[in-house]
Image (cartoon, rainbow, N blue to C red):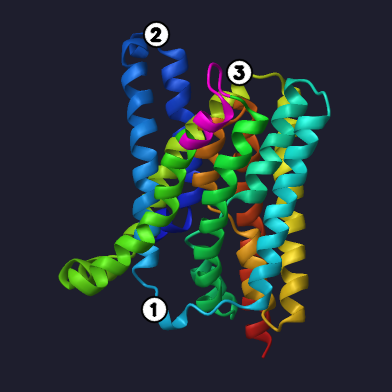
Amino acid sequence: MLRFLKNWTLPIAMLIGTLAYLMFAKWSFLAPTKPYVNSFVSIITPWLIFAQLLLTFCKIELKELKPKRWHLWLLMIQGFSCALTAGVLLCVPMGELSKGFWEGMMVCLICPTATAAAVITGKLGGNAATLTTYTLLSNLLGAVMVPLVFPLVEPHEGLTFWVAFLKILSKVFPLLLAPFFVALFLKHYVRNVHRWLMEHSGMAFYIWAFALALVMGQTARSLINSDLSAWLVALGGLFTCAVQFLLGKRIGSVYHDRISAGQALGQKNTVLAIWMASAYLHPLATIAPGSYVLWQNIVNSYQLWKKQKKENLT
């Protein structure tokens, strides 16, 4: 039973999140609890992301953190594509649907690498150490780019750019980087806690599943409260997913690290992406990273199946 639940965690979490939203939307007797539930989700989601990153970074060995040339190329691609998308949003007049489409692609492009990417990379035969290094670097890039770009494309009413910048920076920067420094502190000064976290690193999977269910409820709200054309925003998630996997693998091939680079650029921390989109961008923007969850897992499933098939033939 536990094995079945683990294998089907992705669709189960997405289904639970969607059903939970429908319950609150359709059952009027739950209306008084909505403000409390919304507050709970907005407060707990960043902490769940923090816990995921902490458990991941606890496994990092500093001596293994060696930047590679392909790291620089991928960081440049993420930064440039995010800036280019923001430029389109700022310079081209567009309606609500188009705005949600482009903002959705933007958050999918700048979103850091998934915490689970190292596991998939290892299973595919890639270098998990170089992947983990890029996970940290992409978190650093996101911590800088998100506060700079998001207030420009989606200004906060009554707030100047710099006030909005500092507001987002104060939430995103610690969320993405503090887990790394906390992990280092625990490793050197509170070793018992660090050892316990290492022994229970598998909790990250269940934390991810719970967080996914929460943010999928927000994505379901955006989809259900919009017309059918809003589903086109999901194509932005498909496009960015395909392009990033392909570019990552192409650049990785040049530096003989194809698998790691492909996963580094293509496999995203979608829970973080949905949270950032729902907190700082147009409501429709959450649809793109919400669909990205599905697209990247289709890619990963195909890659794992292909590798297993190849091993069976040899």
Residue span colored magenta: 156-166
- Regarding residue 305, the answer to whether it shows in the image is no
Q: Which mark is residue 165?
A: none
Left or right: where 147 falls relative to 93 = left
For marks 3 and 1 on the same chain, the one whose residue lies earlier in the sequence: 1
Q: Are marks 3 and 1 in contact (CB under 8 Å)?
A: no
Residue drawn at x 80%, y 36% is 88
Tell me: residue 232, above or below residue 260.
Answer: above
- Foreground residue among 17 and 36: 36
Percent x, y for residue 15? 49, 37
Q: Residues within 10 Å of mark 1 (few under 14, many from 20)?
A: few
Let me know if residue 71 is in the magenta part: no
Residue that carries the numbered disc 3 in the rendered image: 225
Q: Are marks 3 and 2 in contact (CB under 8 Å)?
A: no
- Kindly indicate the quadrant of the structure image that contains residue 102: top right
Q: Residues within 10 Å of mark 3 (few under 14, many from 20)?
A: few
Q: Amino acid at mark 3?
A: Asn
Front disc: 3 or 2: 3
Q: Amino acid at mark 2?
A: Ser
Residue that carries the numbered disc 1 in the rendered image: 61
Left or right: where 86 falls relative to 130 = right
Front disc: 3 or 1: 1
* Screen quadrant of the N terminus: bottom left
Mark 3 → mark 2, Cα distance in angstroms: 17 Å
For marks 3 and 2 on the same chain, the one whose residue lies earlier in the sequence: 2
Residue drawn at x 46%, y 29% is 19
- Kindly indicate the quadrant of the structure image that contains residue 99: top right
Secondary structure beneath label 3: loop
Q: Which mark is residue 28?
A: 2
